[in-house]
Image (cartoon, rainbow, N blue to C red):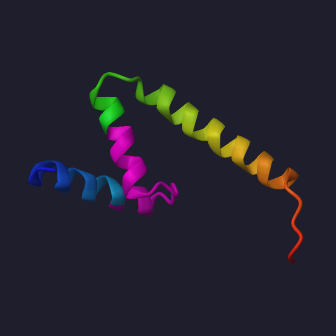
Amino acid sequence: MNNERAQLLDSLHELSNILETGLDRETLSILLELTEAGVNPEALAALVKELRKQREENDEQTPTFFS
């Protein structure tokens, strides 16, 4: 990773933390790469929201044996 890209990712991660998005550096890096490749950022945002929703629904349905 070149220095410019590392600085960009650092800035994105800092902004992500300020906004409390819950996105880690690896996820942000992947999303950045997809955006740079021409994927619509709004579509990516919708996908992230949908995946989180599905994970939450799955977590609610998963029985817990240890409380």
Q: Quadrant of residue 25?
A: bottom left
Vertical side of 4 occupied by 46: above or below = above
Give the left or right position of residue 45, taking residue 1 as reference. Answer: right
Q: Residue furthest bottom?
A: 67
User: Does residue 22 belong to the magenta stretch?
Assistant: yes
Residue at 10% of width from left, 54% of height from top?
3
Residue at 35% of width from left, 31% of height from top?
34
Q: Nearer the viewer, residue 5 or 58?
A: 58
Residue 55 position, x and y percent, is 70, 47
Residue at 26% of width from left, 59% of height from top?
10
Residue 66 position, x and y percent, is 86, 76
Vertical side of 29 occupied by 66: above or below = below
Residue 53 position, x and y percent, is 70, 43
Q: Nearer the viewer, residue 65 or 31?
A: 65
Q: Quadrant of the C terminus?
A: bottom right
Q: Quadrant of residue 6?
A: bottom left
User: Does residue 17 belong to the magenta stretch?
Assistant: yes
Q: How many marks?
A: 0
Q: Where does the magenta region start and end?
A: 14-32
Q: Residue furthest left?
A: 3
Residue at 33% of width from left, 46% of height from top?
29
Q: Residue furthest front?
A: 65
Give the left or right position of residue 16, taking residue 61 as reference. Answer: left
Give the left or right position of residue 1, taking residue 38 as reference. Answer: left
Q: Main secondary structure of the magenta part?
A: helix
Residue 23 position, x and y percent, is 47, 54
